[in-house]
Image: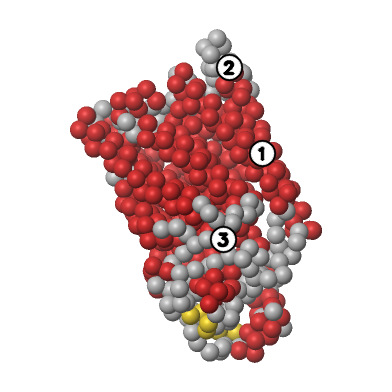
Amino acid sequence: METAYQKKNVVWDWLTTVDHKKIAILYLIGGTLFFLKAGVMAVLMRIQLMYPEQSFLSGQTYNELLTMHGTIMLFLAVTPLIFAFMNYIVPLQIGARDVAFPFVNALGFWIFFFGGLLLSLSWFLGGAPDAGWFAYTPLSTREYGSSGMDFYVLGLQVSGLGTLISGINFIVTIINMRAPGMTMMRLPLFCWTTLIVSILIVFAFTPLAAGLAMLMLDRLFGAQFFQVDAGGNVILWQHIFWVFGHPEVYILVLPAFGIISEVVPAFSRKRLFGYTTMVFAVLLIAFLGFMVWVHHMFTVGLGPIANSVFALSSMAIAVPTGIKIFNWLFTMWGGKITFTTAMLCASSFVPTFVLGGITGVMVAMAPVDHLYHDTYFVVAHFHYIFIGGIILGLLAGLFYWYPKMFGHMLNETLGKLMFWLMYIGFHVTFFVQHILGIIGMPRRYFTYMDGEGMNTYNFISTMGTFLMTAAIIVLIINIVYSALKGERVQSGDPWGARTLEWSVPSPVPEYNFAQVPQVRALDPWFYEKVHGDGRMKAAAPLDSIHMPNASFLPFIIAFGLFWWGLGMTMLTMEQPWLPPYIVIGAGVVLTFGAMIVRSVKEDHGHHIPKQTVEAIQQQSR
């Protein structure tokens, strides 16, 4: 028996969906496309640095690639990939039928996507941004920065708005929509990290939005926030950016912590060791994350007192992080470990992230940071956190939750080949960059001189990049092969897992749970398999289910913001292809017109009849 949403045109269905599972897949697709784009940029930069005094790229092109690589990876690749898992898994883990605000959830995706598209248009409309992904002033001001910086400012403002409203949505969802019995101290660790990260997003993206607005006013309307000759202060931008920038690291890495905390117990056949201490460690990391931004500014000249205070707070984060590391190790200790691809990624995450953390403590020492700052040592440290931590966590989550999301398994042989290519390639690429930094190679330079002892290490680093590229190609082949010939999931729980998302069929029905579950313990699905009859107890009788209607308005609002932002960038173009204020006006009309329609049009959703629910449940057994 088909439900109404299955009868739609496929394209129209995906453009108008408010189903959190389909939005998750949209985030997964969008984030993957941006990830591949940023990855190609990284390969091009490493080819340029493969030999000394190369002319493969010009200095300007290298600056543009460097800026876009960092910006895309942080804002448009890893963030949406994390949001993909949050969207799909969190409502299932808390026993909810959807997120709190389905319309806002769809709006958040489309705003993110069109913001990324606006930023990417810079390549075709005067050149990409070139002041670095951190956009330091005065390099990013109108006097020095190219017109591409206008796309940086407006694109990130639009995209960041989508991330911000999505964060608010997750906070409300986790606080208000948990199933009966799902107390806060029964939340899976992935839900805890999602909640904390969503709070971080609200508090971190707000100063970023303010800083981008100030930079926009400087560039487009002649304001003087960062104009030194007019009384402005360029250091102010660094404070604003890093008040956002360091919590952003934890916005990206804490969900990876949550994924590892789900994968390790599942494949160790043990409950997570020290659940309560893990929760409080996450809370402490999030709190301290706002207390350390100045360690990015030790060489600015803020003085010994400020440097000492922020050095101590930076090193203090090692304590709750160490708690999590030991808890993962104790979870594996004595367990019956199954080294699937997901578990390989999760277990290798631990030593890799520890190495990144050790170098983090090193750069947290202000006197030593004067040696490391703006060298490749910092590049190596950052990528050990970013790739060795976050990307390995995301890959573990991909292989773990893929059968739940798509109804079939990824090929394990190809998966393990991908892992070893990625893991070896990563260490080959970035470990030697520590040595390059100690030798004195500056970061962000597009070339270097021969005879300075850097040739061999740069060549090795580039070879590692090729290995990582091969790993991504193998992953793509795996996804395509598994879609065509992969093992179809015969049950909702192919891993013998512990949490609530594995209690529902694969693929998951539109309504998630035919009956809202009654949670009786931490790891509720495992509890019912051991102490119950292998099924979740129902908190309410089977009845018709209320679901939200699909809507095209989120797409229109986001499309309007895109045109609005594009019109703003045209204000400084020498020969805009349309009068800027016409483009701005069209964007304003689209955006506010769709918002007015949403406000005045009543939409009470629809009900899936009880008979339809029963038929779907019968088919899934």
* Residue 328, image x, y percentages: 47, 52
Q: Is residue 530 at all visible to an observer of this figure?
A: yes
* Residue 361, image x, y percentages: 37, 35
Q: Nearer the viewer, residue 447 or 407?
A: 407
* Residue 184, image x, y percentages: 38, 69
Label 1 sits on residue: 421
Instruction: Say what secondary structure mark 2 lies in.
Output: helix
Other residues around mark 3 within 10 Å, as few (<14) / some (14–19) / many (≥20): some
Label 3 sits on residue: 269
Quick one: quadrant of the C terminus? bottom right
**Residue at point 53%, 45% (across, down):** 349
Q: Which amino acid does label 1 sit on?
A: Leu
Other residues around mark 2 within 10 Å, as few (<14) / some (14–19) / many (≥20): some
Q: Which amino acid does label 3 sit on?
A: Arg
Point out the tag, 2 or 1, that comes first from the N-terminus. 1
Other residues around mark 1 within 10 Å, as few (<14) / some (14–19) / many (≥20): many
* Residue 420, image x, y percentages: 65, 40
